[in-house]
C-alpha cells in the first residue's frame, strides 16, 4: 500500500540541502533576500519554492532582481506568493509573470508579447478566441505544475519513486518542452546509473530551454559518466558561459581538464571555485589542487596590479 505524503510533511535544513543539491550559502542568501522564510524546518511548499529559486538562479538572474520582481508582482496583482502561484520566466535581467492570461513585467507594468501563442487566424480556424485559448493554456499550465509538484513530493520517498517517474513521463508526453520535468526524471535515471537515459533527458531540457545552466551542468555530468569527456567539457563550458559564477560547474570542469592532462586549464577553474565557494571540503580540495599545479608547473599567477596572487590558507 503506497505511503501517503501530505502537504504537512516537514523537511529539515539538511534535507533541503540534500534534496535540492544546494549549498548552505545559497540558502542563507535567499533567506537574507526575503525570498524564503528562514528557519530549521521547511514545508513541501517551501521545497517547491526553493527549487524554483534554484532554477531561476541558473538562468543568471540575481537574487536582488528576483526579489524586486516578486515584490512588484505582489503590489500590482495582489498575488501573495508569485513564485508559487504564477508562472515565471526570465525577461532580460528581471522576471516576467503570467497574470490574467498575459505575460507581464511587474516592475515596468508592461505586457509582453507571448511568442508561444498561436496566431489569431489559426485560432479562428479552430473555432477559438484568443481569450479562450489563453484560458485553456493557463489551465494546462496549472495542471502541469500541479502534477510536477506532486511528482517532486513522491520522488523523495523510495516507496513512491515509481509513481513519480510515471508522473514525470506523463508531463513530458503532454508537454515535451517541460524542462524541469526532463531534469528531474533525468536525475532519477542518473542516480540509477542509467546514464544513457539521463543524457537523453538532460539534452531535451537544454533544447527546451537553451539558457538553462542547470541542464547544461547535469548533461556534462552524464556525459562524464559515459566517458565522453570532450563533450562533458563542452557542456560544463556552456553552463559557465550562461552563469559565470556557477561554482560547481567550475569544479567539475577543473576535474575534467585534469583527467585530460590539461593542468593549466584546470588551474583557472580551481581558483574560480575557491573564490566562489571558499569554505568546505570541496574548497579545500580545490585549493590543494591549485597549489599542486602551481608547485609542479612553476606557474606565476599575476594580478591586475602586477603583484603575485597568493592562495589563502585552507
Image (cartoon, helix red, strand yellow):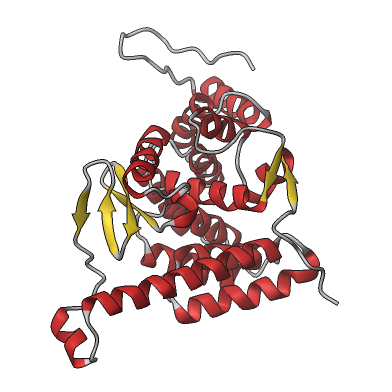
Q: Which residue does the image show at 38% across and 50% down from the upper left?
A: 238
In this rendering, position of residue 77 left or right of residue 219: left
**Looking at the picture, how far across and down is residue 132, in whole percent?**
29, 79
Q: Residue furthest left?
A: 121
Which quarter shows the N terminus? bottom right
In this rendering, position of residue 74 left or right of residue 157: left
Q: Which residue does the image show at 42% across and 57% down from the upper left?
A: 86
Q: Residue furthest front?
A: 78
For the question of whether residue 18 can be seen, the reply is: yes
Compared to residue 286, the image places residue 108 above or below, namely: below
For the question of whether residue 186 can be seen, the reply is: no
Q: Which residue does the image show at 37% across and 7% down from the upper left?
A: 307
Which quarter shows the C terminus? top right
Quadrant of the rendered image containing residue 67: top left
**Looking at the picture, how far across and down is residue 144, in whole percent?**
49, 71
**Along the viewing direction, whichever of 208 and 48 lies nearer the viewer:** 48
In this rendering, position of residue 141 left or right of residue 285: left
Q: Which residue does the image show at 35% across and 41% down from the upper left?
A: 75
Compared to residue 225, the image places residue 60 above or below, namely: above
Looking at the rendered structure, the number of numbered marks drawn on it comes to 0
In this rendering, position of residue 159 left or right of residue 178: right
**Looking at the picture, how far across and down is residue 261, in whole percent?**
52, 42
**Looking at the picture, how far across and down is residue 20, in whole percent?**
62, 49
**Along the viewing direction, whichever of 98 and 80 lies nearer the viewer:** 80
Amino acid at each position: 500500500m503506497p505511503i501517503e505524503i501530505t502537504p504537512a510533511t516537514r523537511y529539515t535544513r539538511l534535507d533541503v540541502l540534500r534534496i535540492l543539491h544546494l549549498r548552505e550559502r545559497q540558502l542563507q542568501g535567499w533567506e537574507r533576500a526575503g525570498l524564503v522564510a528562514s528557519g530549521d524546518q521547511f514545508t513541501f511548499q517551501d521545497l517547491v519554492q526553493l527549487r524554483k529559486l534554484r532554477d531561476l538562479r541558473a538562468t543568471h538572474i540575481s537574487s536582488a532582481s528576483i526579489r524586486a520582481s516578486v515584490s512588484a508582482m505582489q503590489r500590482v496583482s495582489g498575488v501573495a506568493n508569485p513564485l508559487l502561484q504564477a508562472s515565471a520566466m526570465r525577461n532580460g535581467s528581471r522576471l516576467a509573470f503570467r497574470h490574467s492570461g498575459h505575460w507581464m513585467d511587474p516592475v515596468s507594468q508592461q505586457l509582453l508579447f507571448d511568442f508561444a501563442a498561436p496566431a489569431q487566424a489559426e485560432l479562428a480556424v479552430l473555432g477559438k478566441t484568443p481569450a479562450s485559448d489563453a484560458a485553456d493554456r493557463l489551465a494546462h499550465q496549472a495542471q502541469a505544475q500541479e502534477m510536477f509538484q506532486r511528482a517532486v513530493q513522491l520522488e523523495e520517498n523510495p516507496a513512491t519513486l515509481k509513481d513519480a517517474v510515471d508522473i514525470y513521463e506523463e508531463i513530458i508526453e503532454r508537454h515535451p518542452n517541460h524542462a524541469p520535468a526532463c531534469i528531474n526524471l533525468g536525475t532519477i535515471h542518473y542516480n540509477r546509473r542509467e546514464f544513457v537515459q539521463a543524457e537523453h533527458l538532460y539534452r531535451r531540457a537544454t533544447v527546451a530551454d537553451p539558457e538553462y545552466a542547470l541542464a547544461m551542468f547535469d548533461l556534462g555530468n552524464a556525459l562524464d559518466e559515459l566517458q565522453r569527456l570532450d563533450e562533458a567539457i563542452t557542456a560544463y563550458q556552456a553552463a559557465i558561459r550562461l552563469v559565470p559564477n556557477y561554482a560547481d560547474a567550475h569544479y567539475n570542469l577543473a576535474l575534467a581538464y585534469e583527467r585530460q592532462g590539461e593542468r593549466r586549464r584546470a588551474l583557472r577553474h580551481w581558483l574560480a571555485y575557491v573564490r566562489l565557494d571558499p569554505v568546505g571540503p570541496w574548497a579545500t580540495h580545490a585549493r590543494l589542487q591549485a597549489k599542486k599545479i602551481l608547485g609542479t608547473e612553476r606557474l606565476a599567477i599575476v594580478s591586475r596590479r602586477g603583484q603575485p596572487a597568493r592562495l589563502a590558507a585552507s
